[in-house]
Amino acid sequence: MPGAPRGGPAVYLVAAVAGCVVGLVGASFRWCLVRAQELHGSLLSASERLGGPGWLIPVLTTAAGAAVACAVAQRVPLAAGSGIQDVEAVWRGEREPRPFLWLLPAKFVGGVIAMGSGLVLGREGPTVHMGAAIGAEAGRRTRMSPRDVTLLHTSLAGAGLAVAFTAPLSGVVFVCEEVTKVVRTRVVLLTLIGTATAVGCSELIVGDRPVFQVPAALAGPPVALLPAFLLFGAATGVLGAAYNRLVIGFLDLPDRVTRIGPVARAALIGAVVGLLISIDPFLGSGGDELSGRLLGGDLPVGTVLAGYLVVRFVAGPLSYAAGTPGGLFAPVLALGAVWGALVHGLALPLLPGGGSGAVPFAIVGMAALFSAVVRAPVTGITLVVEMTGTTSLVVPLFAACFAATLTADRMGSMPVYDSLRLRMAKPS
């Protein structure tokens, strides 16, 4: 159509406007999720006061939430799971960007219900997928070329990640390192402007403070500890490779157990997670509260940390297999924090000067496990630095993430989103 923008400089204006929409939608998603989690917390408090059969309340509410969220996702193709693998498939030309008419509300509503009920899932998956859908729709509505529609789809996915964690730099790095695996000027510029407007608008609703508050005087560990962080990173690489296998293993389980329908299966998984929550609320949900507790220096005893590690190691992949909207990032970050704090406690007698405390190990553990699972170390480092506001740990972060990524690669473990993308491409 004459006069309609068809790429060139106009695409940057489209990215900026679409970024505003992503910021408002993503921040509204975060706000609704907080309200849903507060409601769930009130139900947990009521169950504790009731005593006796009160433990059934979290079991029933999480089971019901998982079932409803799965039913929502069943109605809309690609609404289940993270959505990051779909963004990567579009960039590779393996599929076309999906219309956002039904995908957006399914991700929004289903994600709030699933995560608000306590499933161990992350908010970043829905926000990344919703951001990508908004970007592609903006390109179609303004009659951009198919190539520019794909660019907007990809760049606004990064804006979605930035809004999920109030981490603008991470959104840009995520697009280049994880989604496209290249650094191209046009992609970077579109992601920069889309992320800038998205985060700016999101701050009107969720503010601009880092997600986690850490001790202000957190000092970097001495150089003598760098070998310890390399060993820690290598061990984390093994843990990450095992986590990836468990994610895919749980997703493949329904292929062998066909008698239970997807909604009933989601309800069963929700009941299991709800039972865990009735034992200890920190065993469920995405893990922000648990991570915040550890990064604030409130450390449980080693046996409790070990319990958190074992249970959440299984509960995260199990929740993802429920087929509801929800991501992997936040649970992996929480698991990494638990892992880091636990390793520090176990290795404390061997660390010179006490290893400068457990909090640095928890922070490094977050980025290292993320690197091992996703295989995007620079994204993991920038994400954790932005979420904690800490820059004193950059050198140990580099060492641990290098070792974690290399170890997971050498073990033959495929990056989790590559595995999910390939699995998505299989005929059903």
Image: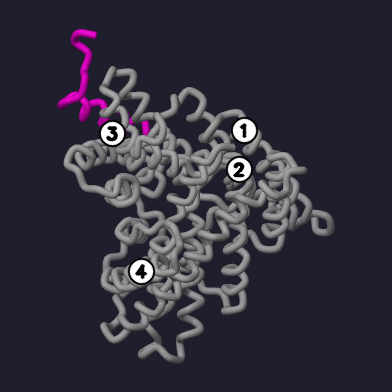
**Type of the residue with mark 2:** Gly
Q: Which residue is mark 3?
A: 151
Query: Does residue 428 appear left or right of residue 261 in this picture?
Result: left
Give the label on residue 112, or none. none
Magenta-drawn stretch contains 294: no
Give the label on residue 323, or none. 2
Q: Secondary structure at mark 2?
A: loop
Disc 3 from disc 2: Cα separation? 28 Å
Q: Quick one: label 1 or label 4, which is nearer the N terminus? A: 1
Q: Quick one: label 2 or label 4, which is nearer the N terminus? A: 2
Query: Residue drawn at (80%, 58%), measured in percent from left and top?
Result: 51
Of the residues tagged 1 and 4, which is closer to the observer? 4
Q: Quick one: label 2 or label 1, which is nearer the N terminus? A: 1
**Nearest the camera: 360 or 228?**
228
Q: Residues within 10 Å of mark 1 (few under 14, many from 20)?
A: some
Q: Are marks 1 and 4 in contact (CB under 8 Å)?
A: no
Q: Position of residue 400 (x, y in %)?
A: 35, 72
Disc 4 from disc 3: Cα separation? 30 Å
Disc 2 from disc 4: Cα separation? 31 Å
Give the label on residue 74, or none. 1
Q: Position of residue 290 (x, y in %)?
A: 53, 62
Q: Quick one: label 3 or label 1, which is nearer the N terminus? A: 1
